[in-house]
Amino acid sequence: IKHEKREFIIYLIIVICLYPIETILISYLNGILFSLISEKPLNIKYVYKLIYCIIGVYLGATIIDYFKRNMENTILPKYLSYMRQKIFENTIYLHENETTDIKMGKFITRVMDITREMKNLMIINFNQLIPNLIVLLCIISAFTIINLYLGIIAIIFAGLIILALYLM
């Protein structure tokens, strides 16, 4: 992350921007389209404009998703290589004074498995956890603005959910 700070920040911004587009904006536009179609005096020009807008948003989301996946494909191999290098260096440093042999086959397999799982956790954290936490904070903020007691209840329940997930 230190060496690729600019790429990592751009990747994080893309992930944070793509999630609301995919979940909120597209659903909102589709809802408007369905409500327009159900109206009796159908304004066909407005429906066409909305369909073009939806196509544009889908196209934009697809292009942004392409760049996100492209950045993942450049960042993650470097991350895996860095983590494997650090694990090997620290293992050599810890065992340099020992006379016992390390079973290298098992050790290499475990290091590869651990780094793959670290990669999977990183992808899950950036693609799901961080955007969902941002949405949760926005919802709690909206509840607090509407009603202070509602905001306090939302904070308590969010804390209970986070605690339950932590204890699992």
Image (cartoon, rainbow, N blue to C red):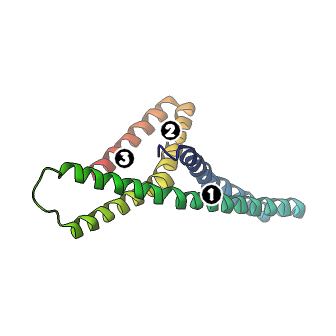
Closer to the eye: label 3 or 1: 1
The relative height of residue 125 versus residue 2 in the rendered view (above or below) is: below
Residue 47 horizontal side relative to residue 130, left or right: right
Q: Sequence-wise, which precedes: disc 2 or disc 3?
A: 2
Closer to the eye: label 2 or 1: 1
In depth, the one of 144 and 61 nearer the eye is 61
Q: Looking at the picture, how far across and down is residue 74, in whole percent?
A: 54, 58
C-beta proximity under 8 Å, tags 3 and 1: no
Going by the numbered disc 1, the residue's amino acid type is Glu
Q: Sequence-wise, which precedes: disc 2 or disc 1?
A: 1
The disc placed on residue 22 is 1
Q: Indicate the secondary structure of the residue bearing disc 3.
A: helix
Residue tagged 2? 140
Q: Indicate the secondary structure of the residue bearing disc 2.
A: helix
Residue 32 occupies quadrant: bottom right
In depth, the one of 18 and 81 nearer the eye is 81
The relative height of residue 14 versus residue 67 in the rendered view (above or below) is: above
